[in-house]
Amino acid sequence: STTINGSGLSQTRSAAALDDSTSSSDDTTKFSNFSDDQLQNEIIGWGQYNSHRVQSILLSMDETLDKSAVAKAGARVQAQVLARTIRRRIRTFLKQRDQCWKTRSSSSSDPSVASSPGGKGAVAASASMKMMMMIENGYAPICVGHSLEESIEVMANHGLTAKDITDILQHSPGITLMRPRGISSDVDDNLGSVSIEDTTIENGECLDHTLDRVFKLLCVTLKLRKYDARKIVRSSPGLLTMRGSKSAEAIVALFHRMGVSHNALARDKAALSVTLLRSPSAIFRLVAFLSSDAIRMPVGKIGPLLRRPLARKLLDAVAPIPQQSLSSISSSSTNSTYGEEAPTSDAPREALESDLDPWIVSALWGKQCQIRRDQTNAIYKQMTKTAWTLRNEIGTADLSKVVCAYPSVLILDAETHILPHAEYLMENLGICEGDLPRVLQLYPRLLALPSQQMGAVANYIESLGVERESLSSMFRAFPALLTLDIEDDMKPVVAFLHSIGVVDIGRFLIRIPPVLGYSVEKELVPKWKHLKTVSTDARFEVTKFPAYFSYPLERVIKARYEYIQDVKRFPTQLISVEKVVSYGDNDFATKVLRDSDGGDGFRNFLDRRKKTFQSNKRKKNQPRPNQFHQRDKGETVAVDPR
């Protein structure tokens, strides 16, 4: 019944064993009956992983390190070693006990052997008792075979700084127990009886090989800079293991086969550190589901979809990383979006907040593997039901477009979210049943909005003077209006319209509903200031043609007025705003300005203006040359500004 938090064996006693295992001769003499090899293995021991020693090694590399981070790294290494030592001692004791019982059983048929003082049964019993004594006193014959300095040296040789190593040891302290380098061919037989798990992890791969694989993937395959690769390694628990690094390779290969280039995958470095930690089999199952008859999404679209930030919530549901999975399993699922069918669990949430190594957290979480499989199966069952509801009851023809626009729609419950929201849109907002599939396909995020929020938006727009009959047409054409915030988005726009002289706000909104979502500082104010410079009555022009605010300022509005003023030499006040901006480029040149060259002159003007604009933008972004520069030795030398 011993657990890793030390309820059966005191961690205080184990911590004392870490400090004294290499120096206490009195304790060592207790086990003089053990062989010299066993004692030598014990003397190699675990004292080098004491938290204070780890801190001193890290600070010797860089004295400017954060002391709290270094202390946490040392504590995590020591906690990992203590927990692993306890597990191994228990396993060793159980093996000795089973061997003792087996020997007693075999020798019971031979009374002479059983009664002999040197018989096998007596020897096995004595070995079992000695092992129990060793466990009680904090000892067991465990061999490390390498030093902590070797592991840190290997990481430093791969370009990791002291800060990098400190951060890595905080989330993956178990890598210090991996064999630093490969075993050479001339290794003696002293380690012949030591298990692979005692000297390395995962089939004998060493830390050097794992680091080679990780940096080859990041720097060669994904073509990341060394700085970015180090940053990803620092923020990716579990990547510096054989399993984690090979899973990362499989993830990159899977996305590449789905049409995502390595450059595109490496572009979002924050998302990459999470993507590399996901299970390749879980991603493959999601790809198979999206390409099946339930969704019918082309495989070439699945890769770019899963790379987008929009798909993060869906990926966290069906392909979580271990720490996320433990958190989700531990939390109550009664108010989750997965529905009431998602199973619950009593997994230890305190493990997430403790100083235990993520491998230990994963071991605790691994005991809930059946619950985890049941939860994943329940999510896929819910996703299948949701897809069927959208296709057959809502009437969505192309479900793949809905998923591309809002991937989280798949984890919404059909009974509690989709059908009630669809009913609200039809009955309360006036969207007819025939238009509902097109509205939801255009903006499926409406299915996740609370009905109270959509009702509040509709009531506020109605209070501005928009008739109730006009609301349905506004929401059919622009369903994104229902997602706007009244205080942050709508009220500043209404205040701006009042300030420029618009009296009938309701009529203005009916003619250009999207204006409620425009930014006042970035869009409305700059366009209004420019309009006042090119027209005699800006308020009249805006009231007559509210759609003026919907056209791009630089590419359309300013470009055409500059062409009128600088090329055609024509007064801008004599041409209405509607004629200037509402036509296409060719019609504007030929029909409004009567150009006889078929619009070639205006197109050439746009090309020259675009090149000039880009050149000025590059010059603006370039840093201004310093009047002084620093030499290597620190002296300041003036530079001739000429």
Image: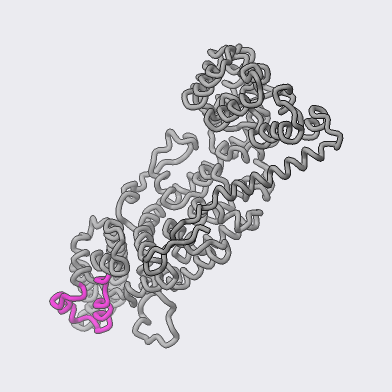
Q: Is residue 130 left or right of residue 439?
A: left
Residue 451 appears at what percent x and percent y?
A: 51, 23
Q: Please identify the residue farthest to the left as the structure is shown.
A: 26
Q: Is residue 568 left or right of residue 438?
A: right
Residue at 21 percent of width and 73 percent of height: 21
Residue 537, compared with residue 32, is above or below; it is: above
Tally of numbered tags: 0
**Can you see residue 472?**
no
Residue 382 appears at what percent x and percent y?
A: 55, 38
Residue 461 appears at what percent x and percent y?
A: 55, 17
**Can you see residue 341?**
yes
Residue at 49 percent of width and 64 percent of height: 226
Residue 631 inside the magenta-drawn segment:
no
Asked where in the image residue 203 lies, by quadrant, the reply is bottom left
Q: Is residue 602 left or right of residue 273?
A: right
- Viewer-proximal residue among 262 and 120: 262
Residue 71, compared with residue 49, is above or below; it is: above
Residue 334, compared with residue 491, is above or below; it is: below
Residue at 67 percent of width and 37 percent of height: 555
Range of magenta residues: 21-48
